[in-house]
Amino acid sequence: SQQGEEDPQALSIQEGENATMNCSYKTSINNLQWYRQNSGRGLVHLILIRSNEREKHSGRLRVTLDTSKKSSSLLITASRAADTASYFCATDARQGGKLIFGQGTELSVKP
Amino acid sequence: GAGVSQTPSNKVTEKGKYVELRCDPISGHTALYWYRQSLGQGPEFLIYFQGTGAADDSGLPNDRFFAVRPEGSVSTLKIQRTERGDSAMYLCASSLMGEGETQYFGPGTRLLVL
């Protein structure tokens, strides 16, 4: 079963705008990972944030983690048309390393 | 190779047939995972290997599904008596040691059962 939910399910923005996606989960975790998936393709790893971290940056990506609220957010700044994809959060829920994924946010960036 | 590879990229089969899906992890990665993704959903865990052994096969849906990793590197997911409901994207991932680490995914095998 899915660990949690992502919000929104779909997001449409203009190029240059920021995109924020949220993820909630249910159990204690080792870490939370964000992935991108272009249509019909495999998952590309974006960033991993550990349970003892609160914020992490990578290029135009900023991830926050609030373990008290069991939630995370992914911010993509200055979005580009090439950012159009589905974005998934996945939690490593201390069960041998298997990841539990949300249903994803479908991001559309219009040029 | 540089990343995780999966073959074939697409597989079309008929209901009742047997299929094998192959995963070649990143060299040196001891942990290997199989996931299944239905259209519009997130991936769902199937099985996890640590070395040659299946450390967790709790995600396999039924006994028609089986996976092996005989030499601790390449893994094969085997599906017997395929059903139309098995149609999905099958994803493989590997990580260096296992729990707590980044998992790197392959491009997936899209299985269509007619």
Image: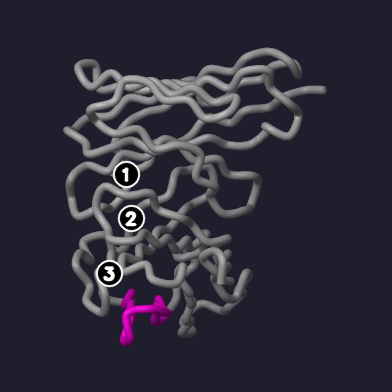
Q: Which mark is residue B1?
A: none
Residue designated by label 2? B45
Q: Nearer the viewer, mark 1 or mark 3?
A: 3
Amino acid type, callout 1? Ile
Tag 3, which chain? B
Q: Position of residue B86 (x, y in %)?
A: 45, 65
Q: Position of residue A94 (x, y in %)?
A: 18, 45
Classify mark 2: helix, strand or loop: strand
* Residue placed most toward the observer, A92 or B100: B100
Q: Position of residue B53 (x, y in %)?
A: 22, 77
Residue designated by label 1? A100
Asked if marks 1 and 2 touch (Cβ < 8 Å), the reply is yes
Query: Quick one: label 3, few (<14), some, or many (20+) residues within 10 Å?
Result: many
Amino acid type, callout 3? Phe
Residue A7 magenta: no
Q: Is residue A77 above or below residue A94?
A: above
Which residue does the image show at 38% across and 49% down from the upper left?
B102
- In the rendered image, is residue B68 in sight? no
Choose top left, top right, bottom left or bottom right for residue A56.
top left
Drawn side of residue A90 relative to residue B10, left or right: left
